[in-house]
Image (spheres, helix red, strand yellow):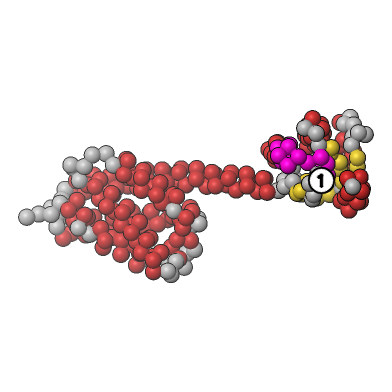
């Protein structure tokens, strides 16, 4: 009784995985270079799950496998070890598996179906190549989407942590601003500072700008709005560490800081604020 290509592939899914892992470049970083037995077994299991789905493409009784492939791709995209692996290295392994399937199909033809027609052989090859092309495209797309989501989340976290309101006592707090301030960060600083001052009933907030290298027109205007907003919620804002270029920008904008106390350093500001608060 002759064995179909589907049967041949299905009976050899673990052999495909073992042969793939045997030829894997173990010097690679990320998921492929692990020497931990549990991680290696997990990697093999993920590869075997792929084969179990992929061989169904050669089963004439199987229906569309988009959902199965989609679930597998999502699982790999969300896997932390794969997230830590460069995308080109992952794509390279897809193509290594493709090469493995091409060799396996040739082995099947030689050992089980030497009379296979050129037409049937080409049909299998085209099915194989098209499937891998679509899988690589879909994986790359979802991997990029996930990477962008993680990058945005990390940026949000960094932004939030980079604008802390530090409460010095029951009435006085310090907002040390460090680094460049873009439009998004300026908006976050405005919202978080107001909310923090309201929640903690801060009466006096010192905003230190000594760690801000550049303040453009937008940031200077946002700073003025922050001071005005703090006034409306009952917090008196003062400034320290204003660089000459920041002062110049404020003057050019016509922003009036005459009603805001300005100090040269944090130390001089706190000595005055603490004295006035006593």
Q: Residues within 10 Å of mark 1 (few under 14, many from 20)?
A: many
- Up the image or down, 107 lies above or below 277; here it is below
Query: Could you tell me residue 144's position as x and y percent?
Result: 50, 45
Q: Quadrant of residue 2?
A: bottom left
Residue 98, position as x, y percentages in the image: 33, 54
Q: Which residue is mark 1?
A: 172
**Does residue 84 appear left or right of residue 49 in this picture?**
right
Q: Quadrant of residue 185?
A: top right
Please state, as top left, top right, bottom left or bottom right, where the N terminus lies in the image: bottom left
Looking at the image, can residue 220 be seen? Answer: no
Compare residues 268 and 168 and report the one nearer the observer: 168
Farthest residue, direction left: 1
| SS label for mark 1 | strand
List x then y, in percent, for residue 219: 78, 37
Relative depth, front residue between 249 and 259: 259
Which residue: 81% across, 40% down? 203
Residue 95 at x, y percent in the picture = 38, 54
The range drawn in magenta is 194-206
At horizontal 37% and vertical 61% (from top left) the residue drawn is 42
Count every numbered label the image shows and give the total: 1
Compared across the picture, whether 75 is left or right of 249 comes to: left
Residue that extends furthest to the front in the rendered view of this protein: 278
Is 110 covered by the magenta stretch?
no
- In the displayed structure, does residue 120 sit left or right of residue 89? left
Q: Is residue 29 visible?
A: yes
Q: Is residue 139 above or below residue 27?
A: above
User: Looking at the picture, does residue 84 appear above or below residue 222?
Assistant: below
Q: Residue at x 45, y 66 (%)?
A: 33
Up-down relation of residue 22 to residue 63 (above or below): below
Give the residue at x 86% y 37%: 249
Judge from the rendering whether residue 239 lies leftward or rightward of residue 143; answer left or right.
right
**Magenta highlight on residue 196:** yes
């Amino acid at each position: 009784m002759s064995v179909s290509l589907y049967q041949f592939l299905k009976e050899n899914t673990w052999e495909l995985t073992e042969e793939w892992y045997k030829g894997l470049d173990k010097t690679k970083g990320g998921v492929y270079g692990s020497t931990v037995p549990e991680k290696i077994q997990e990697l093999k299991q993920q590869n075997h799950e792929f084969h179990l789905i992929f061989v169904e493409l050669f089963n004439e009784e199987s229906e569309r496998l988009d959902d199965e492939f989609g679930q597998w791709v999502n699982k790999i995209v969300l896997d932390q070890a794969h997230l830590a692996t460069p995308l080109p290295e992952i794509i390279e392994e897809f193509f290594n598996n493709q090469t493995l399937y091409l060799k396996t199909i040739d082995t099947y033809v030689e050992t089980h179906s030497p009379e296979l027609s050129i037409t049937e052989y080409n049909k299998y090859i085209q099915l194989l190549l098209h499937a891998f092309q679509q899988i690589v495209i879909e994986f790359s797309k979802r991997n990029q989407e996930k990477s962008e989501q993680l990058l945005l989340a990390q940026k949000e976290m960094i932004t939030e942590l980079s604008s802390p309101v530090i409460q010095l006592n029951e009435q006085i707090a310090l907002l040390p601003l460090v680094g460049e301030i873009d439009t998004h960060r300026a908006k976050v600083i405005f919202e978080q500072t107001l909310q923090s001052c309201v929640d903690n009933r801060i009466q006096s907030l010192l905003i230190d700008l000594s760690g801000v290298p550049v303040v453009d027109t937008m940031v200077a205007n946002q700073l003025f709005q922050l001071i005005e907003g703090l006034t409306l919620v009952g917090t008196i804002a003062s400034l320290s560490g204003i660089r000459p270029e920041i002062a110049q920008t404020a003057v050019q904008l016509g922003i009036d800081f005459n009603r805001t106390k300005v100090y040269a350093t944090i130390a001089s500001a706190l000595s005055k604020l603490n004295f006035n608060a006593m």
